[in-house]
Amino acid sequence: MVRIATWLLLTLLWMGIFMPVFAADWAGVDETVVEHYAEEYGRSARDPYINTDQGDLLLFVFTLAGAAGGFIAGYNWRKFFVEEGKGESRKGEVHA
């Protein structure tokens, strides 16, 4: 148990000390690839139609999607996991 705690502590220290240094040098795909080709072909960057960086809009959209997915999965739960398929019996025999 002490050995696991030691490795966990060392890993957290490594991530806390060295990872911010390495992460600062990397640019995202948008900055390196998309903007390069956009400028090459004469298109400038513009604001998105729906800006999800402001407020809690993105959180709200993911909450709605999760609620819709949960409702669909809950409504079809028996079909997915409990009930048998059409034409099959519990022993796997197929009926015509």
Image (cartoon, grey):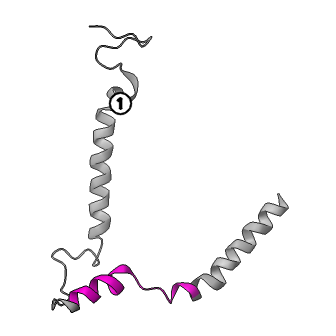
Q: Looking at the image, which residue sits at the far right?
A: 2
Q: Position of residue 42 (x, y in %)?
A: 15, 92
Residue found at x 31% / y 57%: 63
Q: Amino acid at mark 1?
A: Phe
Report which residue position mark 1 lands on: 80
User: Does 62 appear above or below 27?
Assistant: above
Which is more toward the observer, 36 or 74? Answer: 36
Query: Is residue 59 one of those drawn in magenta?
Result: no
Q: Position of residue 32 (x, y in %)?
A: 35, 86
Q: Position of residue 25 (x, y in %)?
A: 50, 89
Q: Which residues are magenta?
A: 22-39
Query: Is residue 38 one of those drawn in magenta?
Result: yes
User: Does 74 appear above or below 55?
Assistant: above
Which is more toward the observer, 26 or 72? Answer: 26
Q: Position of residue 82 (x, y in %)?
A: 39, 23
SS at mark 1 in the image: helix
Residue found at x 35% / y 18%: 84
**Image check: 19 left or right of 24?**
right
Residue found at x 30% / y 32%: 76
User: Does 87 appear above or below 54?
Assistant: above
